[in-house]
Amino acid sequence: MTNPYDLIVVGSGFFGATVAERCARELKIRVLVVEQREHIGGNAWSYTDPDTDIEVHRYGSHLFHCTSADVWAYVNRFSGFSNYRHRVISRHQNSFYTLPMNLGTLSLLYNRFLSPDEARELIAQEAKAAGITHPTNFEEKAISLVGQRMYDALIRGYTQKQWQTDPRELPAEIISRLPVRYDFNDAYFTDRYQGLPLIGYGKLLESMLATPGIETRTHTDYFELQTTLPKGIPTIYTGPIDRYFSYRAGELTWRTLDFERELVDTRDFQGTSVVNYPDLDVNFTRIHEFRHLHPERDYASHRSVIFREYARFATRKDAPYYPIDTRTDKSTYQAYRALAAQEPYVLFGGRLGTYRYLDMHQAIGAALKLYDNTLAPHFTEGRPFKSNSLEATDP
């Protein structure tokens, strides 16, 4: 059977879409993109709400930020970007605090104005009182960074709800994603490049996959389709790596999210795009109000759309969102890495394919690297398809 495609990309999130676009545009090869969901774009998909015309992020607010000029230039090929700067409010016991931690947050928690030196001393004292010298898990690392009081008020409950795991069982590096500041800067990100696509994520991703040479099939199960395709077509797989191998080394643990949509009869429900709810007596983790993601738009509707976000463990029937990455998971994933090294014609990439937490810019950066270092040399020079190297997709 003649191969109808030169490359198959499983998954149409930013990693898969970038690989497909680069290969089709630059190499002029035939690319088939297979997507299990009814839409492209993975968790970055956005659409226009039919009741309000507000752009909604189907899987929660997605904020684009990066330090890479190459990644920024790449996404700007498909859309201009706004100058949106993300800020998060945390509502604890009916009071509000700004995240990430800054002097304003700490001054409110301690009910007095704190200087940078005073704040550092308070946190050091609390870490010492907790007996933490060499943090080995999320809880210990968090207390060493933000102190016991802030951890108890704004971090512990939120983390427990978000990950459905005792914080003492989570790896320490997760909390390192949250900035800690000893000034009054409450901007969530400090990257040089930040913003949201002016045309929306949905249309941006559609533009990427509209590149001549790409065929996209949504609502398609790759494992069913695979039986109808010729053997030996180079494949980029961005789905869950444990699913690819039929869970033979065990199941990795994943977190998934559920969203409860509500159309509210007010123009402005909460005054900001995201409010966290860290208290355990509230069963959701945060509320998204999408109107605030694009203040430059003049939405005419006097109603607003909000999403309440709930986190839980993923089952095999769910779409996994984030790796939990416990000690057991690390061992299981190493077994899958060994299996992947023996898999011909297949490279694994993206958040699910490499069992790593990747932001959008990291997924794009990893895909560009894979294209430059592996895919382009393979298709232009005949170099071997490096199916034994998961590191080829490192961001």
Image (tube, grey):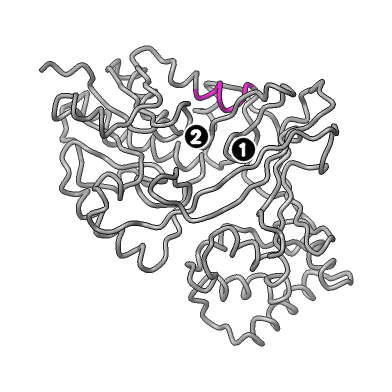
Q: Left or right: where does residue 90 sit relative to residue 228?
A: right
Residue pictured at 19% horizontal, 24% vertical: 228
Mark 1–mark 2 CB contact (< 8 Å): yes
Name the amino acid type tagged 1. Answer: Tyr
Residue pictured at 36% horizontal, 25% vertical: 20
Q: Is residue 367 in view from this perspective? A: yes
Q: CA distance from mark 1 to mark 2?
A: 10 Å
Q: Residues within 10 Å of mark 1 (few under 14, many from 20)?
A: some
Under tag 2, what secondary structure?
helix
200 part of magenta stretch = yes
Q: Which quadrant, please, contains the N terminus?
A: top left
Q: Which residues are magenta?
A: 199-205
- Quarter of the image where one finds residue 232: top left
Q: Which residue is mark 2?
A: 71
Q: Left or right: where does residue 319 sit relative to residue 167?
A: left
Q: Main secondary structure of the magenta part?
A: helix
Name the amino acid type tagged 2. Answer: Val
Above-or-below relation of 78 to 394: above
Q: Is residue 395 in view from this perspective? A: no
- Quarter of the image where one finds residue 19: top left
The one of 56 and 175 positioned closer to us in this rendering? 56
The one of 27 and 227 positioned closer to us in this rendering? 227
Q: Which residue is mark 1?
A: 193
18 part of magenta stretch = no
Residue pictured at 69% horizontal, 29% vertical: 82
Q: Position of residue 281 (x, y in %)?
A: 71, 64
Above-or-below relation of 77 to 195: above
Above-or-below relation of 335 to 189: below
Q: Position of residue 338 (x, y in %)?
A: 21, 55
